[in-house]
Image (spheres, helix red, strand yellow):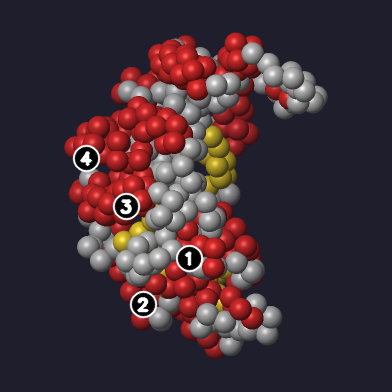
Amino acid sequence: MNQDELRHWSKRAADWAADYHAGLRDRPVRASVRPGDVAARLPARAPEEPEPMEAIFADFEALVPDAMAHWQHPRFFAYFPAAAAPASMLAEQLANAMAAQCMLWQTSPAATEIEQVMVRWLRDALGLAGHFTGTIHDAATTATFCAVLTMRERALGWTGLTQGLAGQARPRIYASDQTHSSIDKAVRMAGIGQENLMKLPVRADLGMDPDALARAVAADRDAGHLPAGVVVCVGGTSVGAIDPVREVLEVARAEGLYTHVDAAWAGSAMICPEFRALWDGVDLADSIVFNPHKWLGAQFDCAVQFLSDPGPQIRTMGLRPDYLQTPGAEEITNFNEWTVPLGRRFRALKLWFLLRAEGLEGLRARIRDHVAWSRELAGRLQDDPRFEIVTASPLSLLSFRLTGDDADARTEALLERVNDDGRIYLTLTRHAGRPVIRVAVGGWATTHADVLAVHDVLGELAGSDD
Ligand SMILES: *Cc1c(COP(=O)(O)O)cnc(C)c1O
């Protein structure tokens, strides 16, 4: 393929993309393929001779879209939606065109400096204190891993990096039992070990008990362990649990522990001042992560980590071998030193396009709509005797189950019918030991009618139950 052909096919791809989005409503939200179906339609070996792009493109159209869950479908209410604003998709096309690798300032001055400015724009948009700086990662998991490694090294006086963990006291990490599995993964990858992640049971309001945290830290100190850090949950993935942020951070501070706030989903809502009470006290944190790729509208992937002082994380993650030295290194930021991989994508561009094309007011309006619509849906489900709301987050996540006999098995069966039906896409979780169906409102193209349609579809499919 030469550059002239690239020009031609890029235009074809842009047309395809526009048609795809225009036709999304007519597709089932979730693919109905069985495991192995797609692979079975691909040749066993790579072609020896070049194939015409016409054939490749035709195969893409024939094979791929029908075998994908459509994350930009307006009736995608599963997991947390990954909203992609058109402006962010456009920016990604341009970043792809340059195929840039943004590991150092020198390899990508614009990427580095737009990233710095976007982190500042978002810090201010979320109402965070002016001392926060930060960086953009691929995923919240990466940010959390960096924060947990920093907790470990800070507690060990930066000896783990060079000597390893053998013979050291056990670093202990504290989190509520509502935190995301990325915290478990982080302690495992950091060599801290699952047994040293102290998962504290939550109170009735699904928040961590700060007194229980203080007691756990004291008990660990008595046992000769090394309390290292606390991960604070703001918007848990299962049902949206929120810790009492200020109280937990105050206990952590008093104990000298490093703190990381996981607001991967809920953080986007903080562009609306009326939701900031949900994370009151967050300015006391050392590290905060939120994913603009979930609810803000920056196309996947894009996770922003704010740091009150980047020093400890850079000391933990940063390496500067001879071949990466850049002259004048004091005045410039090399973001690879803040994270896991050396190579980095140009993720700031889509934030720049998104924030300008929509404006903060446009983004706030969308989030407010999602919250209001999800409350309206919760009300309708609650008023329908067939359903029972189990949890309703103050944001746009709710969970429910069927009422009546054998509710658990019938709830699970209902979810299967819903997802086979294809008009909406929902997922299951367990709450207090029982299955519940989640509804997460947050799609870029989702309308009021789409959200209310959840009740209609559920009513129809629940009705056929008995
Ligand atoms: C989605 C989510 C994560 C994981 O996000 P990735 O960016 O996919 O790693 C972590 N924590 C919470 C609360 C989440 O909702």
Identify the mark nearer the N-term, 4 or 2: 2
Three-letter code, disc 2: Arg
Percent across and percent down for residue 50 are 69, 19
Residue density around tag 2, few if under 14, some if 14–19, many if 20 or more, within 10 Å:
some
Label annotation for residue 360 = 4
- Label 2, on which residue? 253
Label annotation for residue 325 = 1
Badge 4 marks a residue whose secondary structure is helix
Distance from label 3 to label 2 (Cα)? 32 Å
Identify the mark nearer the N-term, 4 or 1: 1
Q: Which residue is drawn at 48% across and 65% down?
A: 325
Q: Nearer the viewer, mark 1 or mark 3?
A: 1
Above or below residue 77? Residue 254 is below
Dividing the picture into quarters, in which one does residue 443 lie? top left
Residue density around tag 1, few if under 14, some if 14–19, many if 20 or more, within 10 Å:
few
Q: Quadrant of the C terminus?
A: top right
Three-letter code, disc 4: Leu
Q: Which residue is drawn at 31% across and 33% down?
A: 370
Distance from label 3 to label 4 (Cα)? 21 Å
User: Farthest residue in the right direction?
Assistant: 44
- Label 3, on which residue? 113
Does residue 87 appear in the picture of this structure?
yes
